[in-house]
Each structure stands twice: as C-alpha cells, then as structure tokens.
Image: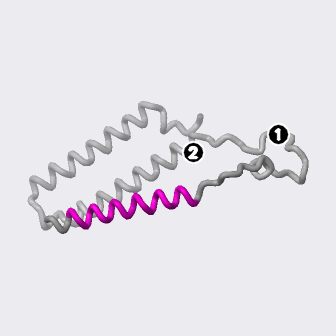
Amino acid sequence: MFSIMTISLIIMLLSVFVMLLASMISKKTMIDREKTSPFECGFDPKSSARIPFSIRFFLITIIFLIFDVEIALIIPIIMIFKMSNLIMWTFTIIMFIMILLWGLYHEWNQGMLNWNN
C-alpha cells in the first residue's frame, strides 16, 4: 500500500514538473503584430480574414461523438450477456438506455436536432 502511494506521488510530482517546464519553455515573450495579422498578398484584407466559427457544426460534432461513445459502451454489454446474471444485466441495460433516451429527448427539446436552421 505504501509503495503504491509513493509511486503515485512520484508520478504526480514528475507530471507537474514536466507541465511547468513545458509552460515556461513555450511562452512567447515577443508578440509581433505582422505575424498575427492575416496575410493577403501584402495588402490589407478587404474583409475579415477570420470567419467566425459556426457553433452549430461544433455541437453537431459533439452529439456525434457522444452517440459514438454510447455505441462503444453498448457493444461490450451485449457480449457479457451469457456471463452475467440475467436480472442484473436487464436492469443495467434498461437504465443505460433510459439515460440515453433522456439525453436524446433533452437534445430534441433544446432544438439541437433541428437541421433546417
């Protein structure tokens, strides 16, 4: 038990040290206006070169990732059907699917699944 705590402490201290070292090395002290400005053939841009990012596409991506992870969690549940207690397996899968359906209803209620906007 003591060795596990010692190893955990060493790993945490080492990771904090590496993060601090990386943040000190990566700091840029000189900010150059020319390097941060958009480049358009040497002339000033006629319009905004940085188009605002659509939050709609970001939210669609997040929803896709959530459903992708859900499928990755359902597949092992199906595989352990033969090795587990039937009542416990049924209760677990029903609760899991109810949580997924509640999340889907919440996304639908918030208007996240309206594709025509």
Q: Nearer the viewer, residue 113 or 2?
A: 2
The quadrant the N terminus occupies is bottom left
Magenta residues span 5-25
The percent position of residue 24, horizontal first and vertical second, equals 54, 57
Q: Nearer the viewer, residue 87 or 35?
A: 35
The percent position of residue 20, horizontal first and vertical second, equals 47, 57
Question: With respect to residue 7, does 103 lie above or below?
Answer: above
The percent position of residue 96, horizontal first and vertical second, equals 25, 48
Q: Is residue 15 magenta?
A: yes
Q: Is residue 41 left or right of residue 99?
A: right
Predominant SS of the magenta segment: helix
- The residue at the point 38 percent across, 34 percent down is 106
The residue carrying pointer 2 sits among few (fewer than 14), some (14 to 19) or many (20 or more) residues within 10 Å by Cα, namely few
Kindly identify which residue carries mark 1.
Answer: 47
- The quarter of the picture where residue 6 lies is bottom left
Q: Nearer the viewer, residue 49 or 29?
A: 29
Q: Is residue 7 magenta?
A: yes
Three-letter amino acid code at the position of disc 2? Phe
Three-letter amino acid code at the position of disc 1? Ser
Q: Look at the numbered disc 2 and give the secondary structure of its residue.
A: helix
- The quarter of the picture where residue 98 lies is top left
The residue carrying pointer 1 sits among few (fewer than 14), some (14 to 19) or many (20 or more) residues within 10 Å by Cα, namely few
Q: Nearer the viewer, residue 20 or 46?
A: 20
The residues tagged by marks 1 and 2 sit, at their Cα atoms, a distance apart of: 23 Å
Nearer-N-terminus badge (1/2) = 1
Kindly identify which residue carries mark 2.
Answer: 57
- The residue at the point 70 percent across, 51 percent down is 30
Instruction: State if disc 2 and disc 1 touch (CB < 8 Å).
Output: no
